Image (cartoon, rainbow, N blue to C red):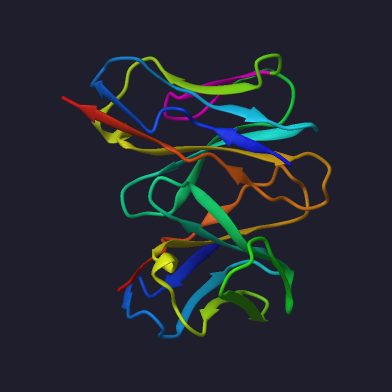
Amino acid sequence: SQTIHQWPATLVQPVGSPLSLECTVEGTSNPNLYWYRQAAGRGLQLLFYSIGIDQISSEVPQNLSASRPQDRQFILSSKKLLLSDSGFYLCAWSLGLAGHNEQFFGPGTRLTVL
Amino acid sequence: AQSVTQLDSQVPVFEEAPVELRCNYSSSVSVYLFWYVQYPNQGLQLLLKYLSGSTLVKSINGFEAEFNKSQTSFHLRKPSVHISDTAEYFCAVSEVNTGFQKLVFGTGTRLLVSP
């Protein structure tokens, strides 16, 4: 069966510090991978998606970046965090290119920037 | 571009009462429709989805949603809720025939079930 892991589960970082959140998927190959941010009262916002290694698309211009160094690994990074980067970050995966495919979400990382 | 509106940010209800969570969408093209549920401090799980065919779709835990094309709605209902249904519910759409799925989510509705 497939599983998706995210770490760390929680993170408290000062403004201006770097960030690295990791997401890995097990039990499947060539998944589509997604990073979402969930801010209070704002629902889920798609940040990045990837259909293959080193193929990253950005949905929202910001100070975050994403990388996919391996087929089942997706990393969200920042060189300098802002207060507005606080939120709940969710990684998800799906298979195939059909619009009706289910996305499977990880447990999330709660980031607080102070 | 698509958008999803969930007007109710929070819906309080007593156990065993019926509930309806509203979802309206806007799109110039055909869409697939989804409801995801998020239990406290967890990721999202797919509850049900409408792709085509019968406009009434059901989940295994008693929820159902009806696609209404003329009203561009996909409201979620349950005739009798349980305490364990307390969670946040997200409506989402994705465009048909894009070659890749990108979900557009609403802002979510928090369902609070009390005894």
* Closer to the camera in the image, B102 or B53: B102
Q: Position of residue A10 (x, y in %)?
A: 32, 70
Q: Which residue: 69% across, 50% down?
A: B102
Looking at the rendering, which quadrant does residue B43 occupy? bottom left
Q: Which residues are magenta?
A: B57-68
Q: Is residue A74 visible?
A: no
Horizontal placement of A77 versus A98: left or right? left
Looking at the rendering, which quadrant does residue A59 occupy? bottom right
Number of labels in the image equals 0
Which quadrant of the figure contains the N terminus of chain B?
top right
* Closer to the camera in the image, B59 or B9: B9
Q: Residue A111: say if magenta.
A: no
Q: Is residue A16 visible?
A: yes
The vertical placement of B49 against A90, above or below, is above
Q: Position of residue A104 (x, y in %)?
A: 55, 54
Horizontal placement of B23 versus A29: left or right? left
The vertical placement of B35 against B12, above or below, is below
Q: Position of residue A34 (x, y in %)?
A: 61, 62
Which quadrant of the figure contains the C terminus of chain B?
top left
* Closer to the camera in the image, A4 or A9: A9
